[in-house]
Image (spheres, helix red, strand yellow):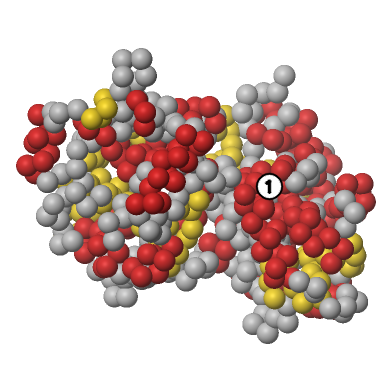
């Protein structure tokens, strides 16, 4: 039996449990209009919109609580078309103010089968009207509303009569534009905090009166704008949530999109289903269908070359493109000398056994190591690897006639850590080889079907497309390879040491049946040596750090509390079997503040 894996991270709920959290929409046939209650009359005086439960009651047999079947809902929608010429679509727009979690918000919406799209924070009201969304979410951001050049939305969006939810900076923007006061917090909140719910209707419907939430702010609302009421608070933030129900505008200071926030999904689904009136109709199969159609139209009779790494992202991208354009796809696998042990053989075997896709292997180890000689800065390493990668591609792609496109398995975490994908003011954390390393004079047009998706979403797509489980469930491996797991200069000797150490980490994790329970597990070679004693002799050799983290999407992660027995076996094997190592340490840092990779 595998040892029980301990982790500090709040794990995602099962689909069954998550489904229970969704606010249920009552069947229309069972709803009956009733006379105004005292509460509703009070709401009428104040101008506030009464809650759903005060406007309707259900029959004794069927109480409110079941989502209508789509077939029955269609008749109601069809009827509404005759009345209204312009009908809102089941789309939620996420306005990007630069938060590292912007895509995570969009992804949480999609998880509940509602289509979401990220747009720039300064999108105009006219452009929003053309899209006809059912709701807007204003993301967080790294700036203060009082900073020079702080991103602010078009004020006209608040006149569109579209429900709006502001998250963190988004809440502060709403308060600022409506005349509230924002000030620096005396006690900044970063991490977990206890939230007290002051109003359990609409946004916090079906939520407990207190729960743990994830905070990340140094400013707070000191005075509410006119027409707004407080709906939640923490010990440090007197106003952690507010609402203007007559305008259908809501705001929360915490981040409901991260897994650390209890009932965060409930808050978002309350907004989508109860406040915005969305229906759960968007699925991954629809994404595949629409993406294949777009690729076919864009590529036409031309050809596509794809940079294959053998990992989940590029492999699933290759299968998706192959389904769209068939033999017009040509995969090029670059052996840059920075790969794991036996990786080239493994990739060739997987593709030969499972797929009928054009594959060329380029042996480019010497070129990469030559350019990396003497380079220690991690950003410079990444850019060099990206540049050399393109050069190798350009050389190999010359043999593919009429090749006009370069396809990559770029994911959103790569993009958001390099820059905002839609022009938002995201702070650059680190550039990725297939994002920041690409030259401006790139002769290929890029095709990146997964640019706004997360790893687990790509795995779901791979499963839909029939990609074997052993490939889909591979742990993420960085594009720059082992170069960013070697701190300092990259040499063949240091690469060989790291490969051997890394192989033993993975072997022991798999033996303990923990491989699928952790997000990533790997070794890092540090730029220091320590004194040791092996036998009766003094040694002065390298240090290996072990990194093992749990995560849902790679945007946040916690270090895994591996069983001591497993840690002991990994350490003993590395020290005894890998020449040049006499010490092993374990990294117990979470993301944030650290990143998963060391560079």
Quarter occupied by the N terminus: top right
Near mark 1 (Cα within 10 A), the count class, few <14, some 14-19 or many ≥20, is: many
Q: Say if residue 593 shows up in the picture.
A: no
Residue nearest the viewer, comparing 359 with 41: 41
Does residue 335 sit above or below 81 in this rendering?
Answer: below
State which quadrant residue 495 falls in: bottom right
- Going by the image, does 160 lie left or right of 305? left
In the rendered image, the residue lying farthest to the left is: 45
Which residue is located at x 63 percent, y 65 percent?
Answer: 432
State which quadrant residue 38 falls in: top left
Does residue 122 sit above or below 95 in this rendering?
Answer: below
Residue nearest the viewer, comparing 147 with 269: 269
Which residue is located at x 38 percent, y 58 percent?
Answer: 85
- Going by the image, does 200 lie left or right of 103? left
What residue is pinned by disc 1? 461
Which residue is located at x 23 percent, y 36 percent?
Answer: 51
Quarter occupied by the C terminus: bottom right
């Amino acid at each position: 039996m595998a040892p029980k894996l301990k982790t500090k991270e709040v794990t995602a709920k099962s689909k069954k449990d998550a489904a229970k959290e969704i606010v249920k929409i009552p069947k229309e046939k069972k709803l009956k209009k009733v006379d105004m209650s005292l509460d509703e009359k009070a709401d009428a005086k104040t101008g506030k919109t009464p809650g759903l439960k005060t406007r309707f009651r259900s029959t004794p047999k069927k109480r409110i609580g079941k989502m209508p079947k789509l077939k029955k809902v269609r008749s109601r929608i069809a009827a509404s078309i005759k009345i209204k010429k312009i009908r809102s679509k089941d789309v939620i727009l996420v306005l990007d103010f630069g938060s590292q979690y912007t895509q995570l918000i969009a992804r949480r919406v999609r998880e509940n089968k509602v289509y979401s799209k990220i747009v720039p924070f300064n999108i105009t009201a006219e452009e929003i009207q053309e899209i006809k969304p059912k709701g807007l979410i204003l993301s967080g951001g790294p700036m203060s509303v009082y900073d020079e050049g702080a991103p602010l939305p078009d004020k006209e969006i608040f006149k569109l009569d579209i429900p709006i939810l502001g998250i963190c900076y988004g809440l502060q923007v709403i308060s600022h534009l409506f005349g509230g006061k924002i000030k620096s917090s005396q006690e900044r909140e970063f991490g977990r905090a206890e939230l007290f719910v002051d109003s359990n209707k609409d946004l916090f419907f079906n939520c407990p009166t207190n729960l743990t939430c994830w905070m990340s702010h140094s400013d707070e609302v000191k005075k509410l704008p006119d027409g707004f009421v407080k709906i939640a608070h923490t010990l440090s933030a007197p106003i952690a949530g507010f609402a203007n129900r007559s305008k259908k505008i809501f705001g929360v200071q915490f981040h409901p999109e991260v897994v650390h926030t209890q009932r965060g999904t409930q808050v978002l689904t309350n907004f989508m289903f109860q406040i915005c009136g969305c229906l759960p109709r968007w699925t991954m199969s629809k994404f595949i269908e629409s993406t294949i159609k777009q690729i076919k139209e864009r590529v036409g009779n031309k050809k596509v070359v794809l940079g294959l790494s053998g990992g989940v992202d590029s492999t699933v991208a290759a299968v998706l493109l192959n389904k769209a354009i068939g033999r017009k796809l040509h995969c090029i696998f670059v052996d840059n000398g920075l790969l794991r042990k036996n990786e080239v053989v493994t990739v060739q075997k997987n593709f030969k056994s499972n797929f009928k896709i054009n594959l060329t292997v380029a042996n480019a180890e010497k070129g990469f190591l030559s350019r990396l000689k003497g380079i220690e800065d991690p950003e410079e390493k990444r850019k060099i690897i990206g540049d050399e990668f393109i050069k190798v591609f350009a050389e190999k792609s010359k043999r593919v006639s009429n090749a006009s496109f370069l396809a990559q398995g770029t994911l959103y975490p790569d993009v958001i850590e390099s820059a905002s994908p839609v022009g938002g003011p995201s702070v650059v954390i680190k550039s990725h080889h297939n994002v920041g390393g690409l030259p401006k004079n790139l002769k290929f047009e890029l095709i990146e079907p997964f640019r706004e998706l997360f790893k687990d979403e790509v795995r779901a797509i791979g499963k839909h497309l029939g990609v074997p489980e052993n490939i889909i469930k591979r742990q993420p491996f960085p594009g720059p390879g082992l170069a960013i797991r070697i701190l300092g200069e990259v040499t063949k000797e240091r690469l060989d040491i790291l490969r051997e150490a890394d192989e033993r980490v993975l072997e022991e994790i798999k033996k303990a049946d923990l491989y699928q329970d952790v997000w990533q597990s790997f070794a890092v070679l540090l730029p220091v040596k320590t004194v040791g004693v092996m036998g009766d002799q003094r040694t002065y050799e390298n240090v290996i750090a072990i990194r093992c983290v749990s995560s849902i999407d790679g945007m946040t992660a916690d270090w895994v509390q591996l069983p001591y027995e497993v840690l002991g076996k990994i350490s003993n094997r590395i020290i005894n079997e890998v020449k040049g190592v006499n010490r092993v340490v374990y990294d117990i840092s979470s993301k944030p503040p650290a990143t998963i990779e060391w560079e």
